[in-house]
């Protein structure tokens, strides 16, 4: 039995984004309870040459909405990268989930061999659909979500593995 490209992408994307949203809720509550200006966390970085938390969220959002759009052969919605508050970051995650929920199995299933070409900075990459999902979208999604998690942990937000995997709820 073959795997469904839809089931292996969109529901996973939504699950990860919901976990990320729950992580941001904990971060906002932590900032409030510790009297920390939320912008300290939103602009936090692990290293000077890495993107801040806000950009990590934006890239995670872009990765899954672009991934879903390319696999489904639909237009990729353009979001401005202007989020600077927890509320705005949560709204971006919510908009991304709403877009992903418009995608159907009929649009994505069978895209394993679809030719996908992407531009990333000055580089151009070409993939088949399954390779694109497994070797580009998922690694980038998990990298940016894990980096967001690590920025918050580094700044004292009480998060654990369960938050990353299930948003703190039971699996």
Image (tube, rainbow, N blue to C red):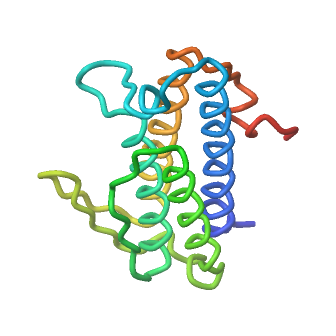
Image coordinates for residue 163, horizontal then vertical, percent = 71, 32
Q: Residue furthest right?
A: 170
Q: Nearer the viewer, residue 41 or 35?
A: 35
Lateral position of residue 87 relative to residue 158, left or right: left
Image coordinates for residue 58, horizontal then vertical, percent = 41, 50
Lateral position of residue 7 relative to residue 13, left or right: right
User: In this rendering, is residue 34 above or below 72?
Assistant: above
Quadrant of image for the N terminus: bottom right
What residue appears at the point 63 percent right and 48 percent down from the top-left corner? Answer: 16
User: In this rendering, is residue 51 above or below 120?
Assistant: above
Q: Residue furthest left?
A: 122
User: In this rendering, is residue 114 above or below 51?
Assistant: below
Lateral position of residue 121 relative to residue 22, left or right: left
What residue appears at the point 52 percent right and 38 percent down from the top-left corner? Answer: 145
Task: Count numbered badges in the picture.
Answer: 0
Residue 117 quadrant: bottom left
Q: Residue furthest front?
A: 35
Residue 73 quadrant: bottom left
What residue appears at the point 63 percent right and 46 percent down from the top-left corner? Answer: 21
Residue 49 quadrant: top left
Quadrant of image for the C terminus: top right
Image coordinates for residue 40, horizontal then vertical, percent = 42, 26
Q: Nearer the viewer, residue 39 or 5?
A: 39
Lateral position of residue 120 relative to residue 133, left or right: left
């Amino acid at each position: 039995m073959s795997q469904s490209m839809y089931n292996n992408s969109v529901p996973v994307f939504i699950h990860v984004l919901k976990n990320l949203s729950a992580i941001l809720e904990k971060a906002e509550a932590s900032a409030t309870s510790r009297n920390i200006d939320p912008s300290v966390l939103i602009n936090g970085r692990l290293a000077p040459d890495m993107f801040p938390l806000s950009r990590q969220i934006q890239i995670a959002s872009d990765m899954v909405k672009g991934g879903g759009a390319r696999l489904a052969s639909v237009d990729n919605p353009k979001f401005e990268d202007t989020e600077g508050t927890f509320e705005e970051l949560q709204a971006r995650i919510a908009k991304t989930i709403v877009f992903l929920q418009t995608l159907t199995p009929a649009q994505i299933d069978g895209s394993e061999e679809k030719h996908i070409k992407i531009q990333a900075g000055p580089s151009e990459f070409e993939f088949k659909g399954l390779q694109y999902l497994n070797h580009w979208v998922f690694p980038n999604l998990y990298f940016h979500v894990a980096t967001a998690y690590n920025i918050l942990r580094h700044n004292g937000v009480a998060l654990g593995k369960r938050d990353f995997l299930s948003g703190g709820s039971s699996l």
